[in-house]
Image (cartoon, helix red, strand yellow):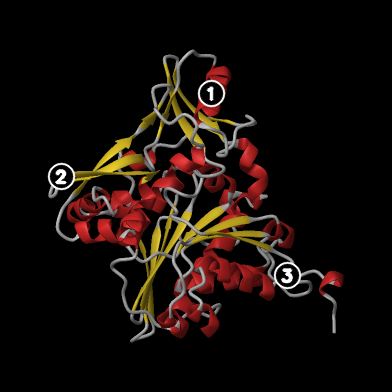
Amino acid sequence: MTDSRTYEWGEGVFTLLSWFKKEKVGDARVLVAGAGALGNEVIKDLALFGVGHIFVVDFDRIEISNLTRSVLFREEDAFEHRYKAEVAARRAMEINPQIKVTPIVGNLFSEVGLALYQSVDVIIGCLDSRLARYQLNRMAMRAGKTWIDGSIENLTGVVKVYTPGVSCYECGLSREEFNIIMLRTGCADVVRSQTSQGRVATTPISASIVGAVQAQEAMKVIHLDAYDSEKLPFTTLQGKMWRYEGLTNDTHTYRFESWKKNCPAHEQWTPVMTGADMSADMTVKEALDELKRICGVKAVEINMMNNKFVEAIVCDSPEREFMVMIPESQLDETIQSDAELRKLSYRTLFHKKFHENIDSYFPFQDLTLRQIGIPYFDVLKVSTDKGGFYVELSADRTMFE
């Protein structure tokens, strides 16, 4: 039996692909958003390809119903309600012990730092709601990265590839679809409950097929800068939609370039100031002081656009205020875990007392950036009288290497 320490993964196999560069794939970093049926297939395929570092993002736990279509999950995972991201990461490294897979249990929009998105070669979306796709598209466009969207329903599967400057998920939404998403993002219990709604029936076959196409497209994106753009040895799905009809075994590819001027999703956060000795473990006061020094100003303001800090929630009937002191992304979980708040949520509306901008007047200066909702390895959007700055929490980089 060959010892894993004495051989190279894919040796003598992938070299048969004339365009495949094993070293490039081994150095690649890929973020997979969603570890359900599609995510399982994508993660498994990336591990088999030998992608050097895979990041798996999912906040959900494994249920019995997941076992019929998720190749990386086992019965004991469901019985013990383990996190999908953690189990998928562990099983992928069992498949290929020569790669690294980092699980991130959290929401892709508010609990994954923008600098992590900027650090990967490609993003793969294995999501099951419009809201989650809308959020991932915002992060990918902001980071200037291509993302590969996959969706399945019964025996039908679709893959779309969104690339900044070519196509954008938000640009392709109808007015009705966009309004539905906006209504959801305005609710107090938005993030965790809404991204888990709208699920559809899936089969292991359609998940395998769509996941394989997503992984294949990821391989192509990883290799794009290895070849002259005029002489690519392959064709990508950038700006296209690939559709599979399982009932008839038909496949079709369509162009769907959707890139509208003035779309708010197109804002790229550049240039980013890197190298600062800043971490999400710093207190608000420490961070504000360091930002003043870095930007050379006397006053700064951190924009909390992704995840407002909720100081309290107020209900109308009966008129009461509850101190919560949490990021908005944790609000629904907090309400559901408190018997009194959960009971009130069924018969009254909650209003939030929140902080969207953090400056020297913020009353909780001793809280850490993490505690107010800023994730590790994030990019801070900073406003000053000299203009705006984007500052990376570079001290957190080692956590994701």
- On screen, 253 above or below 53? below
Q: Which mark is residue 291?
A: 1
Say which residue label 2 marks: 319
Identify the residue shown where x is 34% and y is 34%.
356
What is the quadrant of residue 13 in the picture?
bottom right
Q: Residue at x 53, y 19 (%)?
A: 292
Q: Quadrant of the N terminus?
A: bottom right
Residue at the image position 43 percent from the left and 45 percent from the top = 141
| Mark positioned earlier in the residue sequence (1 or 3) | 3
How packed mark 3 is, by other alpha carbons closer than 10 Å (few <14, some 14-19, many 20 or more), is some
Q: CA distance from mark 3 to mark 2?
A: 57 Å
Of residues 2 and 367, the one drawn nearer to the viewer in this rendering: 367
Which is in the foreground here, disc 1 or disc 3?
Answer: 1
Q: Which residue is mark 3?
A: 97
Is residue 151 in view from this perspective?
yes
- Of the numbered discs 2 and 1, the one sitting upstream in the chain is 1
Q: Amino acid at mark 3?
A: Pro
Image check: 285 left or right of 49? Answer: left
Q: Is residue 120 left or right of residue 342?
A: right
The numbered mark at residue 187 is none
As measured in the structure, the alpha-carbon distance from the residue carrying label 1 to the one carrying label 3 is 41 Å
